[in-house]
Image (cartoon, rainbow, N blue to C red):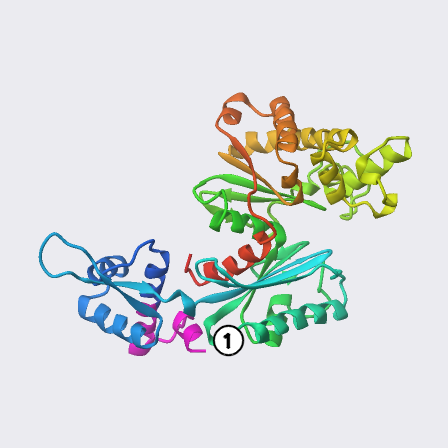
Amino acid sequence: MWLNNVLSESEEVSNKSRQAKQKRKIIRALSKSNVPLTIPELQKQVRISTPTTIKLINELITDLLVLEEGKKETENGRRPTLYTLNIDKFHAIGVEILFKRISIAVVRLDQKVILEKQDINFRLENTPECLETVISFIQETLKECQIGKEHILGIGIGLTGRVNTLTGESYNFFNFREEPLAQYLTKRLKKQIFIDNDTHVMGLSEQVLGQAKEAKNALVLNVSRGLGMTIIAHKKIVTGGMGFAGEFGHMQMSNSEKLCICGKRGCLGMEVSGYALEENFKSDISGGGISLASNNKELEGIRYDDIIEAANEGDGLSINLLQQMGEKLGMALGNIVNLLNPELIIIGGKFAQAGYMFTDSIKTGMNKTALTIPLRYLTIKTSQLGRETGYIGASAMVFKQHDLI
């Protein structure tokens, strides 16, 4: 627990607590630096006297949290020692819980994945039994990993549905307990739990490891079975008052009579999503359409992944459905571009696999609704992150909470 004690905030006012606070400043400065730092360079950043900085650095070296990294080259005079963080002592667990898959990874501070597992037979249900399955899966991973528990700073969880990241509450799943989900899991797993919805976690992953690293204002879309959005404004993810910001799929953008799971009609997610793609495909096939995706498969067994794969293989019906959907999405996005003026939009989720055939149709739709000047300023990209997006973003939540990234 010593590492968590060093990083934890305390209101106690004493010499010991003051030095712990100063150590946190040193650790965070080293963590965020791209290069090793000397004592004078550290001192400037943390604003601690030279004797105190030297004393604390030596204590952190004794605790194996900081390492000496050779000497800095100088034109003349004595070469100062360089110091760096011992990243092998800083890890987090990242968990992604989706409707039909649970993934987990042990991730080092530099985003290196130490251990990764997933269960594709998992089915998300709002039941105590399903919650116990999740807890067991995490506990098994903690046992399997060869890293001391004292070197794991916490567990980040990206969960589909509505989540209040500030209170740790989940409103769609595992909401049958009186206490917030994060609080309950913290007690059960004996590690601090941070929770957010899967779309915000995807956006954070793009910020940490993907194409939104340098972007000041960006939108990251999660187009998979559902439709969600992460809004990045001035390099910060906008969560809103209750963590609901980015519910793009529930914007009223059509006259559709399809009933959404939220209880309303006309939601964009009923027109643009994996679910909508499956329904449109079934309707076309039932009406006499022919597709590669339906070869050797029962119609009810076809998933939107199969349709996207068929489109990539040149299947006309699948391409047409994707392009129609992309244009609808583009028209909706054009309104958001007019409102927020982002410099970058990243298409993430399973639909990113459709590449240019999807993004080109999005651009066509945006041309119909977006103003010319903000559209000219905008770049649209597809996510280059693979299935690690979820657990990388979830682990990054832990590191961000400790102000290490």
Q: Which residue is mark 1?
A: 149
Residue 351 position in % (x across, y down)? 66, 40
- Is residue 198 something one can see in this rendering? yes
Which image quarter is the C terminus in? bottom left
On screen, 294 above or below 1? above
Horizontally, is 40 left or right of 105 in the view? left
Residue 145 position in % (x across, y down)? 55, 72
On screen, 134 above or below 45? below
Residue, x 73% and y 56% (percent of image)? 100
Residue neighbourhood size for the residue with mark 1, other residues' Cα within 10 Å, grouped as few (<14), some (14–19), many (≥20): some
- Is residue 171 something one can see in this rendering? no
Which image quarter is the N terminus in? bottom left
Q: Secondary structure at mark 1?
A: helix
Residue, x 23% and y 68% (percent of image)? 53
Quadrant of residue 130 in the image? bottom right
Foreground pick, 218 / 318: 318
Foreground pick, 148 / 228: 148
Residue, x 36% and y 56% (percent of image)? 32
Residue 175 position in % (x across, y down)? 71, 64
150 in magenta: no
Amino acid type of disc 1? Lys
Quadrant of residue 269 in the image? top right
Foreground pick, 259 / 155: 155
Question: What's the magenta region?
Answer: 1-23
On screen, 303 above or below 88? above
On screen, 281 above or below 147? above
